[in-house]
Amino acid sequence: MDIEKLNLNISGFEGPLDLLLELSKNQKVDITKLSILELADQYLDFIKMNINRLNLSADYLVMASFLALLKSRLLLPKDETEEFESLEEDITKRLLHYNAIKIASEKIQSLYQEGKDFFTRKQKNNDFFVSNKIVINASLHDLLKTYVSIEKTRKRLNLHIQKDQLFSADDAKLWLKYFLLNFNDQWSELFDFLPDSLINYKLKKSAIASILMASLIYAQKGQLQIIQDNEQRKILIKAKRKNG
Amino acid sequence: MDNLIVKKLVEALIFSSLEPLTLSYIKKVVGNYGDFDVNKIIKEIESDYKDKGINLFSSENKWFFRTSPLLNNYLKIETEKKRKLSKSTMETLAIISYHQPVTRAEIEKIRGKPVFKGTIDILLDLKWIKPKGRRETPGRPMTWGTDDEFLKHFGLRNINDLPKVEELESIGLDDK
Amino acid sequence: MDNLIVKKLVEALIFSSLEPLTLSYIKKVVGNYGDFDVNKIIKEIESDYKDKGINLFSSENKWFFRTSPLLNNYLKIETEKKRKLSKSTMETLAIISYHQPVTRAEIEKIRGKPVFKGTIDILLDLKWIKPKGRRETPGRPMTWGTDDEFLKHFGLRNINDLPKVEELESIGLDDK
C-alpha cells in the first residue's frame, strides 16, 4: 500500500465507513470481491498515521478495533466459527449499502430542483377572495329532540310545584308582632309563641327557625329584648317600650 | 437557441419573478443567448394567453401574469365552515318554533333560564327567526317567530309540518 | 358556466394560490358552479401547458404551476443564493427517502457515524422530512419519512418517482 495515498485528511470523510469505502476503491474490484484483510490493514494503517490528530473521533476507533478483531480472526487457521464469517459478510454488506446510499444521494441531487432548475410563482398576491361561510350544523332531529326535552323538564317542574308548607320568616314576624302587642311587660319564653297548628315535624322546625329569626329582627329594631343565661336555658323575650 | 425556447424563457422569467419585469430587463436576459425580437415575442405570448385563465399584462411597461378579468365573477371563493349551535340557542329556537309568536320573557319562562340577546342575534343573523309584531300587553314586548330560512334549513314546507310533542314522545324521541 | 370558463377558472385558481392546491379543494370551488369533471379539466390544462415555459405539475396530488425544468440552463440567472446542503445532510436525506420510515439509530448504522441533531433539524425546517410515528420496538423510537416539500422541491410526483438505484435494490430495502 502506497503510504502517500493514505496521506489524506481525515476530515475529508463522512465517518469511518466513508473512509473504508474510499480505501476499498484502491482494490479496483467489486465490493463483494474485496479482500477484507487488505482493507482492514489499510484502515488500521491510516488510523495509526492519524492517531495523534485530535479530530479522530471515537467512531473511527470503534471501527478500528472491530477491524483489528476481524483481521485476527481472518489470520487464524481455518477453524473460524460461523460468527466471524458473518462479521466479514456484515462489513461487506455495510459497505455495499453505504455505497448505494451515496449513489442515491447523488441521484437525488441531480434531480431538477426548485429554485435552481425550475421556479414557482413568487408573487404573493392572490386574485381570489376567499371567505368562510359559516354553515350551521343542526338537524331537524336536533331541534325536535331539544324541544321534547324542554317540554319534559317543564312538565316535571309543573308536577312538583306545591303550595309552600313551611312556616316562613314573614309568617313568624306577623305572628310575633301580634304577641308583642299583647304580652308587653313580662318576660316570656320565646318558643311559647309557636303556633298551635304545627302538625308535622318539618313545619315545626321551620317555625322555630323563623320565630328565632323574627325575634332577632325585632331586637335589632329595638322593639324587643332577648336573654338567654346559657345554652341550656330557655330563650326569654320581652317587649321594649319606646320610652324605656 | 431557437425562437420557441426564447418564448418559453420569457414566459418562465415573467412567471417566476417577484416583481413585474421591465422590457429592458427581459431584453438583457434574452440578449445572453442571441439577438431576438423581444417585442414580437412578448406580443406572441400575450396573444397565446389571451383566452386562458392567466393573461399577460403590462403596466408602465412592466410585464406580469395575472388571472383573466373575465373571471372576475368567479374569483370569490366561499368555503363552508360547519358550526354547531350552542344548547341554549337550540333551545331558544325550539321554543320559538313551537310557541310562535312568543316574547323573550315567555321563552325565559318556558326554559326556566334567561335568554341572552346574543342568542336572538345569532338566530336573526341566520334568518331563522324574525320579529312578529308586538304583544298588546303592558310594555308591548316584541314577539318572535320563525323565518323562511328556518323552514329551508330544516326541510319543512311550513311551520305546521313540525310534529306535535305527543307524536315525538310516541316515537321515543324523549329517550335520553 | 361552460367547460371553457371552468378550465380558465381552474388555471387561475392554481396560478393564484400561494400553495399547491389539492384536487378536493379545486373540486369544491368548481362545485359551486355546477357538476364538472375536474380530473379531466386538469388533465387538459396539464397537456395545454406541456410545451410552454410554465408547466402544470402535481406533487402528492397537489397541483401548482412551475417553470419548465427544460429551461434550467437559461433560468440560472434568476437563481437566488441558496444554502448548499452538506454531504452528510444529503446522505441522511437519501437514507430517509429510500428507507422510510426509518429511525435515527438505523440511519446511524447505515452511515456508520452519529447523526447530529442539526442534520435532522435542517431537513425538518425545510419541510423535507417529518416524523412518521413511533416504531413499536423497545424504546418506541421515532421514525422519519419525507414530507411534501421534499417531493415538490425535487419535482417528484410521489415517492415512487425517486430515481431507481439498482445497488440499493439488490441489497433489499427491508434489510435494515
Image (tube, coloured by chain):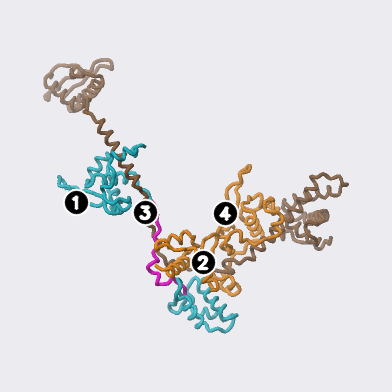
Chain colours: A brown, B cyan, C orange
- Say which residue label 1 marks: B133
Q: CA distance from mark 3 to mark 4?
A: 34 Å
Q: Amino acid at mark 4?
A: Lys
| Magenta span includes A23 | no
- The residue segment tinted magenta is B64-82
The N terminus of chain A sits in image quarter: bottom right
Q: Nearer the viewer, mark 2 or mark 3?
A: 2
Relative placement, left or right, of C87 versus C75 is right
Tell me the chain of label 1.
B
Q: Name above or below for residue C79 compared with residue C21.
A: below
Q: Nearer the viewer, mark 4 or mark 1?
A: 1
- Say which residue label 4 marks: C130
In-front residue for pair C168/A69: C168
- Say which residue label 2 marks: C43
**What percent of the width, then of the height, locates residue B57?**
44, 76
Residue, x 54% and y 80% (percent of image)?
B28
Name the residue furthest right: A77
Tell me the chain of label 3.
A
Mark 2 crowd level (few <14, some 14–19, many ≥20, 10 Å Cα): few
Q: Is residue A211 visible?
A: yes
Q: Tell me the element at label 3.
A: strand
Which numbered tag is attached to residue C125? none
Q: CA distance from mark 3 to mark 1?
A: 28 Å
- Say which residue label 3 marks: A135
Relative placement, left or right, of A174 versus C80 is left
Relative placement, left or right, of A10 versus C37 is right
Assess whether mark 2 and mark 1 are in contact (beta carbons under 8 angstroms): no
Residue, x 41% and y 65% (percent of image)?
A128
> Does label 4 lie on the same chain as label 2?
yes
> Does label 3 lie on the same chain as label 2?
no
**Quadrant of the rendered image containing residue C8:** bottom left
